[in-house]
Amino acid sequence: MSELLVKNACVIDPLRGINAETMDIAIRDGRIVEEVSGAAEVIDARGMLTMPGGVDSHTHICGTKVNFGRYMSPEDMRAGRTPRRGPMHATSGYSVPTTYGNSYRYSVMGYTTLLEGAMAPLEARHTHEEFIYTPLQDTMANTLFDGNWAIMEAIRDGDTKRVAAIIAWTLRAVKGFGVKLTNPGGTEAWQWGKNVSCIRDPVPYFEVTPAEIIRSIVEANELLHLPHSVHLHCNNLGTPGNYTCTLGSFGLIPDLNPKRQTLYATHVQYHAYGGSGWKDFCSKSEPIANFVNMRPQIVIDMGQVMFGRTTTMTADGPMEFNLYRLHHDKWSNHDVELETGSGIIPVVYRRKNLVNSIMWAIGLELALLTKSPWQCLLTTDNPNGAPFVKYPEIIALLMSKRYRDAEFATVHPDTGSRVPLPAIERELDWYEIAVMTRAGQAKALGIQEIGKGHLGPGAYADVAVYPIRIDDVDPSVDYQKVIEAFGQTEYTIKRGRVVARRGECVVDGSNATFWVKPRVSEAYDMGKDPDFIEKFDRYYTVRMRNYPVQEEYLNRNRCIETEAEI
Amino acid sequence: MKVTLVMKPATKSFIPIEAESIVPKNFLAGTDLSVWRGNRELRLDEVFSISVEGDADRVEDVEVVLSGDTSRLKRVGEYMDGGKITILGGIGMHCGNFMSDGTIEVHGNADGWLGREMAGGTIICRGDAADYCASGYRGGRKGMTGGTVEVFGRAGDFLAESIAAGTVIVHGDAGDMAGAEMHGGTLVVHGNCSRPAANMKSGSCYVFGTAQGMLPTFRKVGTIQHEGRTLIQFTGDIANRGKGNLFVKDYKYLD
């Protein structure tokens, strides 16, 4: 039995409605408890800001495309090298670091739970193997269903229950957590050298539209009672004027779940563009945020862009090809048979560039114009908008109008006429930041019930203690102190153990992977469906029995079983 | 100052030694350096018999002479910024990585990645150079950005890949994909090579022998006289905007 007591902590725990109360946190055997014995080890937090461990609900840290990003960029691997030190392995890389690099840097910032944003089912083994070497965070993987042949055939036949059954079989086979749609239909069209321009364009051969895919999979997701909602990367990413497409997609979504949102729309910054071309490119964050404000069934994340060097990687193959034609630099394109695809290119976001400056402003506007912080979460779509190590700067920008103005003065001079950012006075408070970086993310992922994202008795003892006293610091003025504090915790506690202390990771760690097993009736078990089996064996290059990821690929895993309605 | 390093015979001579510390600048402060064999750090005098003649204040006055079986010695002269390294035998991979000034002379053969991503200085190889001589690294944007590499023997595949500036001269034949992704600088191959200058953006590539497997995406311009030779001039790779120049003595398309 190991016991730990964090004393005199200034706790913000939004899922329990606790806002800056000084209290003690008792931990026994990796869980939060009411009280511990006198023999417990004591950490004196001395009034420092203490929150549940950070949760990143959309990041790209593990898997085949992340790895390709690593090996196509030797210059990135040379940046950010750190030698072996104590229990810490050597790391390298800046925008796509090694797995240990990701894990250590997240841990130092107080993050204990990560969701890999896009895992191609066929390549799930690779993702799970990299999860094993991301030791200081619990991990989950969203599974891609945007161009799945069997699902598109079921949608064409109007059989939503069969869609749900295929999702259930696949999630179970690849040990996935949620359902991800990346440019639904578009990546399949890309296999024909095409794309879909918006939600009403039919996909070649299958003749289903993205709108039908989204609607049908959203309904299937709720039939399976998955903890997370559908996780959508809208069509038409990154093109001027795409905000109408985004609003159209949001408009498809009914409110089906009382406990959480029905749609999680990711990196919405890339989907909130106005104008008819790059010449009159502008921000349309206001209509998007207004729409979200009126619909509690939608949660978005920012996908904030920060200036500097990074690598973009997504399952949206055609979009990356368009980017390649803009930059004429390195490009990788990848096709995953019957399922999805991906593309990767390195980019540099520059202040001197008008488009990049507008993108930077849009992300902030979305966070500031969305009234409820539970509905707009803080991400950079790491590493697409910026590497996650920029999160502290984003927090400071959201908390300080003065910092925003100072930064705004350094961007392209024409930005002011294209974005509403300078007119926005709102400054987020500590509580709202806590929502956007942990509580909101845990709620959106549906993992608060298994004990993530809060500090109630029974919860996982994931705690981040930041070296800042919120009564002494005015974040709108002392934004530099905010950046420093969120950049490096005093203590990061993961499952009851101190894993990082003032920038040093102090244990080797052992993570857990969460995955979902929906229980469906015999009639909907795709493993026994003759049509499914026949098509699988005919079109895939792997045998159906070799396809599922064996449990030995999951070091330590927590299976979340759900009772499906089918 | 002349530092002579004679490789001691080792029982497991096939294990490569990482010797990025062998750079003239480091010997200004003495010979208390270390190298790595596998995962073991070794003092320089455990691997070499060292003798030092004279002394120097400036890196330009330092000459390092390596002899013995140095063909498994890697990264010699990495980030070298002056002075001279003379290698009497062959040398292992990554010799002269990122060097910016000074001279490296190899009397034997050089293994792969000789002068990778070098920015300045001179490398002379009297024997053959293996693959990726004077090239960039895999996935990198820029290869060589300055200096000169001269190989008197043959060179392997991917000679001067992604070269951005500087000069590479090979007196023998070169392998496949010489000057691939070239975007600056000069590449001269006195012998034959195959598929030269694929996807070139800029710079000049000369082949004084036959270009085998000549790519069809180069447009023929005419013939020119160059240092007493008659060469056929092509534009750069029109698959990539057709910038730069390729000159060949003779060429053969793939059948």
Image (spheres, rainbow, N blue to C red):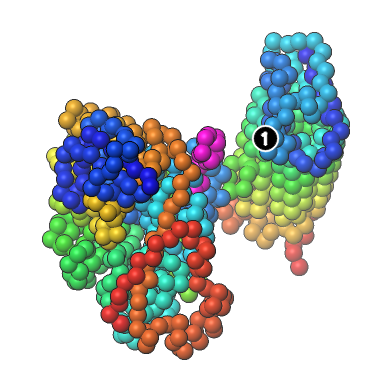
Q: Is residue A77 above or below residue B52?
A: below
Answer left or right for A324 relative to A366.
Answer: right
Q: How many marks?
A: 1
At which x and y percent is residue A435?
22, 48
Please report the bounds of the magenta region as a residue range: A81-99
At which x and y percent is residue A560?
35, 66
Looking at this view, is B63 or A273 the one in front? B63
Q: Is there any visible trace of residue A272 in the rendered image?
A: no
Q: Is residue A544 above or below residue B81?
A: below
Q: Is there any visible trace of residue A459 in the rendered image?
A: yes
Q: Quadrant of residue A486?
A: top left
User: Magenta span has B210?
Assistant: no
Query: Secondary structure beneath disc 1?
Result: loop
Q: Quadrant of residue A223?
A: bottom left
Under mark 1, the amino acid is Asn
Q: Is residue A207 above or below residue B246?
A: below
At which x and y percent is residue A197?
33, 68
Question: Which quadrant of the figure contains the C terminus of chain A?
Answer: bottom left
Looking at this view, is A143 or A288 the one in front? A143
Q: Chain of mark 1?
A: B
Looking at this view, is A20 or A331 the one in front? A20
Mark 1, residue position: B97
Residue furthest to the front in view is: A38
Chief SS of the magenta region: loop
